Image (tube, rainbow, N blue to C red):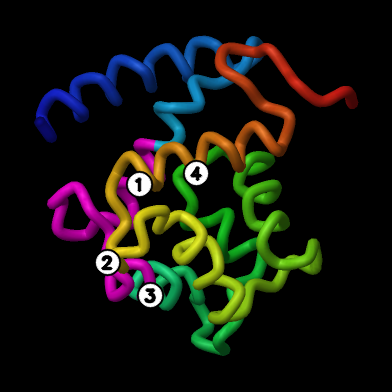
Amino acid sequence: MHLFILILLTADLVYVNSQTTQGYNLKALSVKEFLRFDANHDGTITLSEWETVLRGDDDDGDGIITCDEYVRHSSSPHNIALGVLNQFNGGDCKLTHDEGLVPYHHMDGNGDGILQEIEFINFYIQVLKNLGLTDHGHTTKST
């Protein structure tokens, strides 16, 4: 299963890279970000894995992830990473630990305390759509 996802992701990323002026493959962006959090590659993200990424993104260890820190670690392109972060931090370019936990709990749709890959991907695609992105260059928000 994971090999299939990796093959699919690789194929999608080639498309994303070749279509940057036309748009993005939202599922490929979501899977790539999921893999950043799924440290043990079991297809789920535990709260411990989530918090490990939050701590790792906080380069100076001050308990706050800045826009620069988040963009540096995110798997998404710069402008998308900034947009994603700003959806959860009030737009001030500072994500506290508590703010960083909010998306985890929102994504856990079945309330079992563990993020399934599908929960993460569905949520992350919606976040990307909230930024006005849709697959392959079609936008839903006017600029």
What is the number of the mark on residue 137? none
For the N terminus, give its image quadrant: top left
Where is residue 72 drawn, in percent x and y? 53, 56
Name the amino acid type tagged 1.
Phe
Split into 4 quadrants, where in the image is the C terminus?
A: top right
Q: Is residue 55 above or below residue 138?
A: below
Which of pointers 1 and 4 lies earlier in the amino acid sequence? 1
Residue on which the image places disc 1 = 34
Residue 80 falls in image quadrant: top right
For the residues marked 4 and 2, what is the alpha-carbon distance in whole angstroms? 16 Å
Q: From the viewer's perspective, is the residue at label 4 or at label 3 nearer? A: 4
Q: Are marks 1 and 4 in contact (CB under 8 Å)?
A: no
Name, please, the residue furthest toward the right. 143
**Mark 1 vs 2, N-terminal side:** 1
Image quadrant of residue 66? bottom right
CB within 8 Å, label 4 to label 2: no
Picture residue at 57% right of the left edge, 12% below the top? 136
Asked if 7 appears above or below 95 in the picture, the reply is above
Secondary element type, mark 1: helix
Q: Determine whether the residue tagged by mark 3 lies in a helix, strand or loop.
A: helix
Instruction: Report which residue position mark 4 lands on.
Output: 123
Q: Is residue 91 magenta?
A: no
